[in-house]
Image: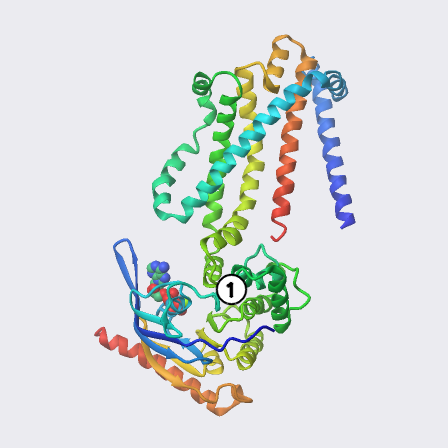
Amino acid sequence: MKSSLLRKIAGYAFAIVFIVAGWWITALAVDSPALPTPIAAVEVLTANVDALVPYFLTSAWRVVVSLLIGTLLAVPLAQAFTRSPVLDTLFAPVVYLLYPIPKVVLLPVLLALFGLADAPKIVLISLTVFFQVLVAVRDAVRSVPQSALLAIRSLGGSPWDEYKHVIVPATLPAVFTSLRIGVGTAIAVLFIAEAMAGSTGLGYYIMQSWSMVNFPRMFAGIIAMALLGIVLYAIFDIIERSLTSWR
Amino acid sequence: MSTQNPGACVEFAHASVTYTSGSEHVSACHDVSLSIGAGESVALIGPSGCGKSTTLHMAAGLLAPTEGNVLINGSAIEKPRQTTAFIPQDLGLLPWKTVLQNASLGLIVQKIPKHEATERARAALAQVDLAGFEHAYPKELSGGMRQRLALARALAADADLLLMDEPLSAIDSLLRESLQDTLLELWQQRKHTQMLVTHSIEEAVYLGERIVVFSPRPGTVVADIQNPLMGTETWRDSPQFAQKCLEVRYALTAGACDTLRKEGK
Ligand SMILES: Nc1ncnc2c1ncn2[C@@H]1O[C@H](COP(=O)(O)OP(=O)(O)OP(=O)(O)O)[C@@H](O)[C@H]1O
Ligand SMILES: [Mg+2]
């Protein structure tokens, strides 16, 4: 137990050293103000932290709300699909055709419909997340062991019991796996949406710094956005692990 | 343990099942008539795909007959009963629940207070020698232990009807015999009604007071062999045991030949 924890810490320490070293060497090689060395980056980050916080919170709020909306819509729908053959035959092709479309191309439409504030960004990220979770959960429900359902049904379990004791625990890990994997896409979409429209959020902050040729400020924004991704990824990873301790 | 239910009576009255998927109709079992008394142990044997599982699903209330009736204690089954325990072929354990949670599942579904459910589940686990594994997950158990866990779930629910679909088919032969002994002892102690689907003639003869032989699909009862010596001491090693096995084998072959003849082959 203890040694595995130590090994984990050592693993992360090595990873950090590796990444920082790679960054450092690249920065020295490129030798451009657009790519500061790690030390310079930490300096700009601490210098800009007060200004960054509101932008960070706006972005974090948008992405978290969108993840929630997308998930809360997708999970029950995916479960309904798989419980009802009729729904599934009707909608599976719809999902299949819509899933691979990059939702981010809808950004101009959403901007025209919803203006420049939070709404178009939240709708766009929710859409992206929605399809990812929908597809993952649909697959997960399909692989629920039939015998588990038979067993609980034969014990006189109601449909609600089936849902609570079988469907939910069997699919919840898939939800968090798809969220963890979806964090990267969600933040990429967030960046594009914020960079293109409006005057709030880290995406705006980064692109504004870029247009002012204020590279240290720009880099502080980039680091903040990376941190947002890492934190969300880690949160979903921890939840996923705690849900799958039985595996 | 809790109060013991007397075994349930099961009656199949001209029960048939036809599966329909799209325009295809598969007649799985046809005109099954079979009357099982309280506390009887019946082994069901027949060729692969002859509708044994289908028959068991009807008794469990998981499937309604397309024609005919299935009655338990005199009334038609409309939905699964809480005191019927059904053990599917791959046991139907929930991998995300601990041994204790799996064992108490039937009680939780029956809305029995949690502490009582836990207590009864613990007692049932002790009965099948799984005390001490309450907090393990099914994947941490061996095949035989998983098997006993599925039994504990039935015991905890205080089942008066135990339906098992090839429960021991995935178990190697030595362990299989010891689990057969466990099944036999439990049945002798509790006197619940049990129906056991099996592919093994020896298992049918070891565990069935009656051995019901099915014809090839669509399955119907072709022989109902009484097996009064079942459960007696050293039964497995007696000459009568071997003889009974032969009798079942003949019935199986005769059933298969009859069907072939009817089909004109
Ligand atoms: N849900 C279903 N839909 C359509 N056909 C089915 C279904 N379940 C079973 N069948 C068919 O009905 C027939 C009887 O199936 P069943 O599972 O009851 O047989 P079995 O005697 O248990 O076979 P085995 O010994 O292989 O377990 C088989 O031909 C099978 O293909
Ligand atoms: Mg079967």
What is the x, y in percent for residue B120? 61, 67
What is the x, y in percent for residue B118? 62, 63
Q: Mark 1 belongs to which subunit?
A: B
What is the x, y in percent for residue A190? 55, 24
| Front residue of this view, candidates A247 and B158 | B158
Quadrant location of the N terminus of chain B in the rendered image: bottom right
Locate residue A64: give its quadrant.
Answer: top right
Type of the residue with mark 1: Leu
Locate residue A239: give its quadrant.
Answer: top right
Residue B169 seen in the figure: yes
Residue shown at 50% from the left, 30% from the top = A126
What is the x, y in percent for residue B123? 63, 70
Furthest residue toward top: A212
Quadrant location of the C terminus of chain B in the rendered image: bottom left
- Residue at image mark 1: B91
Residue shown at 43% from the left, 79% from the top = B42
